Amino acid sequence: MAVETDDMRLWLLEDWGVNVTYTVQGGQAKTIKAVFDNDFNVVDAGGEFGFATQMPRLVVRTSDVVAGTEGDTYVVQGVTYLSRVVQDDGTGMTVVQLEKQ
């Protein structure tokens, strides 16, 4: 159970996040705040050498992506992504795994 309010979550995102243009499929675009993460992860393919892949994702307020599903569009710092996994963490925040277009 989350202790903070939705307004407190927005304050966090305003301090640490970036503006993101979010468009739910068939809907209107809107600007939301999100923390963007695009780390490299090493993947073990079962051989002698692994390979690195980027794992772009957003952390957003659940209230900003209530209707969020796979295939929605997010524009982050001028780059367009599609959502591939939308995970509500049960605390009022949602993690959105992205795929660069």
Image (spheres, rainbow, N blue to C red):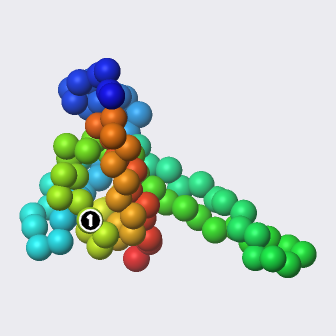
Specify the farthest residue to the front: 1
Residue 14 visible: no
Residue topped by disc 1:
69
Query: Which quarter of the figure has residue 35?
Result: top left
Query: Which quarter of the figure has residue 40?
Result: bottom right
| Residue 26 vertical position relative to residue 87 in the rendered view, above or below | below
| Residue 68 vertical position relative to residue 51 in the rendered view, above or below | above
Left or right: residue 21 versus residue 55 is: left
Percent of width and height locating residue 82: 35, 70
- Judging depth in this view, the residue of 7 and 4 nearest the camera is 4
Percent of width and height locating residue 101: 40, 76
- The residue lying at 19 percent from left, 43 percent from top is 63
Q: Residues within 10 Å of mark 1 (few under 14, many from 20)?
A: some
* Amino acid type assigned to the residue bearing label 1 in the image: Thr
- The residue lying at 11 percent from left, 73 percent from top is 26
Number of residue marks:
1
Percent of width and height locating residue 56: 49, 60
| Residue 34 vertical position relative to residue 15 in the rendered view, above or below | below
- The residue lying at 85 percent from left, 73 percent from top is 49
Quadrant of image for the N terminus? top left
- The residue lying at 39 percent from left, 50 percent from top is 95
Specify the farthest residue to the right: 48
Left or right: residue 40 versus residue 30 is: right
Residue 88 visible: yes
Secondary structure of the residue carrying tag 1 is: loop
